[in-house]
Amino acid sequence: MIKIVPISHDTLVQAERLVAQVFPFQNLAERLSFTAFAKKDNRIVRAITRLFGVKELINFWVALNETNRVVGTTGLYSYLRDCDEAVRLAWFCVAPNERGQGIGKQLLAFSIEKARKTGRPYLRLYTGDDPIEREAQRLYERFGLKEIRRERKLFYSKIFRELRLK
C-alpha cells in the first residue's frame, strides 16, 4: 500500500533521483523544477520560472511505500499561455522496479482529482514515445487523456495529451 503526500524537504532528493532515473534527458528548466518548487515563494525564483513560461508551480506529491521510500511522483503546474484553461501534469512517474502494482493508477487518479479542484477545464501533459513509456500511454488512454498532437524531435516524438475536466 502506498500513501501520496506533498513533497517535503525530506523527500525532495529521492524524488529528484527518481525523476532523473525515469527521465534522463531533461532540459534546464526541467532539471531545475524541483529546486524551483522548493523555493517557489522566493521572488527571484518566481521571476525565473516565468521566464520559462511557467505561471505557477501548484504542488508536487510523492508516493511513499511502507518504508517511506519514494516510489512515484506527480505534480501540477500552469503555463502563462493557457493558465486560465489548463493545469499541467508534471513529473508523473513510477520507479521502474515498482511498476505493475497499481501505483501509477493511484497517482493518476489522485492527480486528476487535484486538477479538478483547480477549477480549470483541462488537464494537459506532454510525454514521449519511448518504448519504456508504452504502459504509461495505455494508462493515459484508460483515464481519458486523449492525444491532441505530436511533435517530431531528433530521436523521439513528443506526445501532447489532454483531459476535459468539466
Image (cartoon, rainbow, N blue to C red):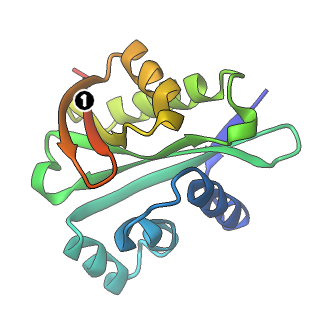
Q: Residue at x 37, y 37 (%)?
A: 129
| Residue, far bottom | 44
- Figure quadrant of the N terminus: top right
Q: Is residue 57 visible?
A: yes
Q: Which residue is mark 1?
A: 162
Specify few, some or many for label 1: CA neighbours under 10 Å numbering under 14, 14-19, or 20 or more.
many
Is the residue 161 above or below the residue 79 in the image?
above
Q: Is residue 164 visible?
A: no
| Residue, far right | 67
Is the residue 11 above or below the residue 71 in the image?
below
**So how many labels did they put on this image?**
1
Residue 114 in the image, given as x and y percentages of width and height: 42, 35
Q: Residue at x 24, y 29 (%)?
A: 162
Residue 28 in the image, given as x and y percentages of width and height: 38, 74
Q: Please state if 26 lies on the left or on the right of 120 as rendered.
A: right
| Residue, far front | 155
Type of amino acid at the residue the image marks with label 1: Glu
Q: Please state if 35 lies on the left or on the right of 112 as rendered.
A: right
Q: Please state if 64 lies on the left or on the right of 118 as rendered.
A: right
SS at circle 1: strand
Q: Residue at x 23, y 62 (%)?
A: 55
Is the residue 33 above or below the residue 144 in the image?
below
Residue 118 in the image, given as x and y percentages of width and height: 31, 39
Q: Residue at x 52, y 25 (%)?
A: 135
- Figure quadrant of the C terminus: top left
